Image (cartoon, coloured by chain):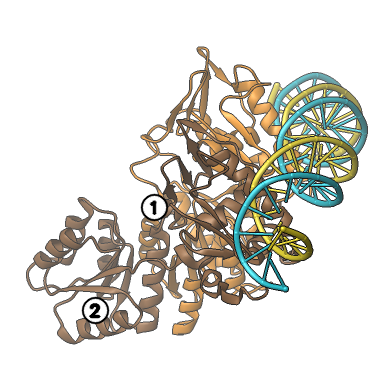
Chain colours: A orange, B brown, C cyan, D yellow
DNA sequence: GGACACCTTGACGCCGTCTTGACGGCGAAA
DNA sequence: TTTCGCCGTCAAGACGGCGTCAAGGTGTCC
């Protein structure tokens, strides 16, 4: 289990031009190499970051580690039913899922869509159409404008810029590790709301986690040490014993 | 207490109450009467509210007046280009738009999707598939749970925010323990209704419990002490001797 | 190859929460 | 009126969660 969710290239947003629009990350799941190759080439050419998985287990693993913005999923996988992959993803994320399938049968489509898929494209498909559907999926998943409006969260002691992935405090930038960032992001995106321990664990560490509350204790302590004026008496990262944590502006 | 088998209605609504969600409203836009008719019949049969428009101008007018939850839009309209209808809608709303079209051409699909459509279905279409795509569109357009609107329950002395898991009283937040929260939640989700002791015990403490009414006495006292203006003379957490408890707003 | 940053894991003390029992008040039935 | 059942109240003890610290392991960059 020594999987490091932390290998995320924080550089994607750490520096530079992220103000306009960050790169979107696509997870392509298909067992046919030529399809994967074609998709990867086309997506990379359009400035998407692309991860690939060739079976369902890998798909779930990669999704947990990389948190893609959209998933393109072939239903015919060697190790498990594609619908099961959909359910596995939907257990912890609302990431848009576009299903690819050679099956034209109506009930197949209905099953996949009702399991949580967002769109269903039958093979053979036109690349232009798939890309358009992908754009549509990404577009509607992006809250309102780009992140730019909701991106700045301020408190008395620090400010969080979600778009630029920066935390400012006392006139200087605060350095956060990838895991600390992820945790902070989930909390800050739910201001005032209680976020359950399970939800935090699954969002940050992946769907396989849900009971390792010691992780939360360690990382909440780190966040408080770096961001709270008095870490022993937190004003912004509130513990709700037995339930979860809450960010208060 | 076994005589209190009358908890049936409360049992049915315990969790599912807020789920007994409102009807979704669909706007069907098509100039072919038989298509409209087929859609209306099928949608009404599935408990959707349906409005219909037979041209683009009417579509925009009805959408503005009725605020549908999803739009099914035929691209071939007599008075204006369907893509213009999409743009007209997207100028002020993000309502999901499912395009119907007889055109299979890829660039048509791309144009419609990039104009803001959420999905594109070619005629002839299977009704089951269309309904599944419609469910998918409505599902992802619904923020998280429909809790967010029904989540605020107010009384004279305090307010309960179920989504944020917060209780407000006299301008300050009230701290509740997990058990207190759970109990409060079950009661508040059944406003005005009697909730049997057995049901409360099983919801909060688990299905193995059903007779430990002393737990209820202790925790109801805690809740009243924290939330009632006069804990000795409760106005919102009413005891029904021998049967259960009732929350009154 | 070595230094470094980061994630994981375990131990420990403290404090809040849950459980449990006892007691008294109140109302209904005998 | 007496008795019984049910409810509200209180307090004490057990229990588990939380914060904290530090060591071990792994990957990465120079």
Nearer to us in this view, B156 or B99? B156
| 2 or 1: tag closer to the N-terminus | 2
Rendered residue at 17%/76% (across/down): B30
Counting other residues with Cα less than 10 Å from the Cα at mark 2, is it few (<14), some (14-19), or many (20 or more)? few
Nearer to us in this view, C8 or A227? A227
In the image: residue B56, left or right of residue B191: left
Q: Are marks 2 and 1 in contact (CB under 8 Å)?
A: no
Quadrant of res A245: top right
Rendered residue at 40%/32% (across/down): A19
The numbered mark at residue B149 is 1
In the image: residue B149, left or right of residue B13: left
Which residue was labeled with disc 2? Answer: B102
CA distance for labels 2 and 1: 39 Å
Nearer to us in this view, B74 or B197? B197
Whether B211 is drawn above or below A221: the answer is below
Residue B142 in percent (x, y) is at 40, 58
Furthest-top residue in view?
Answer: A171
- Residue A140 appears in view: yes
Counting other residues with Cα less than 10 Å from the Cα at mark 1, is it few (<14), some (14-19), or many (20 or more)? few
Give the structural element (helix, strand or loop) at label 1: helix
Whether A159 is drawn above or below B187: the answer is above
Tell me the subunit letter for badge 2.
B
Furthest-left residue in view?
Answer: B79
Residue B127 in percent (x, y) is at 35, 83
Give the structural element (helix, strand or loop) at label 2: loop
Residue A118 in percent (x, y) is at 44, 65
Residue A44 in percent (x, y) is at 47, 50
């Amino acid at each position: 289990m020594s999987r490091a969710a932390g290998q995320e290239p924080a550089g994607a947003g750490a520096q530079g031009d992220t103000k306009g629009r960050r790169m979107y990350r696509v997870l392509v799941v298909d067992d046919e190499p030529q399809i994967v190759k074609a998709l990867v080439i086309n997506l990379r050419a359009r400035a998407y970051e692309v991860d690939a998985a060739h079976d369902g287990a890998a798909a779930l693993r990669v999704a947990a580690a990389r948190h893609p913005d959209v998933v393109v999923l072939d239903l015919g996988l060697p190790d498990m039913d594609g619908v099961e992959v959909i359910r596995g993803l939907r257990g912890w994320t609302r990431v848009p899922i576009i299903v690819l399938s050679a099956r034209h049968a109506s009930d197949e489509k209905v099953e996949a869509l009702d399991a949580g898929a967002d769109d269903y494209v039958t093979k053979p498909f036109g690349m232009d159409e798939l890309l358009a559907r992908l754009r549509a999926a990404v577009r509607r998943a992006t809250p309102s404008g780009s992140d730019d409006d909701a991106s700045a969260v301020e408190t008395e002691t620090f400010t969080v810029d979600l778009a630029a992935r920066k935390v400012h405090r006392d006139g200087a930038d605060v350095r956060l590790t990838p895991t600390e960032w992820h945790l902070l992001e989930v909390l800050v995106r739910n201001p005032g709301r209680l976020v359950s321990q399970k939800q935090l664990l699954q969002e940050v560490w992946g769907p396989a986690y849900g009971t390792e509350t010691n992780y939360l204790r360690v990382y909440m302590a780190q966040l408080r040490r770096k961001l709270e004026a008095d870490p022993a008496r937190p004003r912004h990262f509130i513990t709700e014993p037995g339930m979860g944590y809450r960010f208060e502006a």
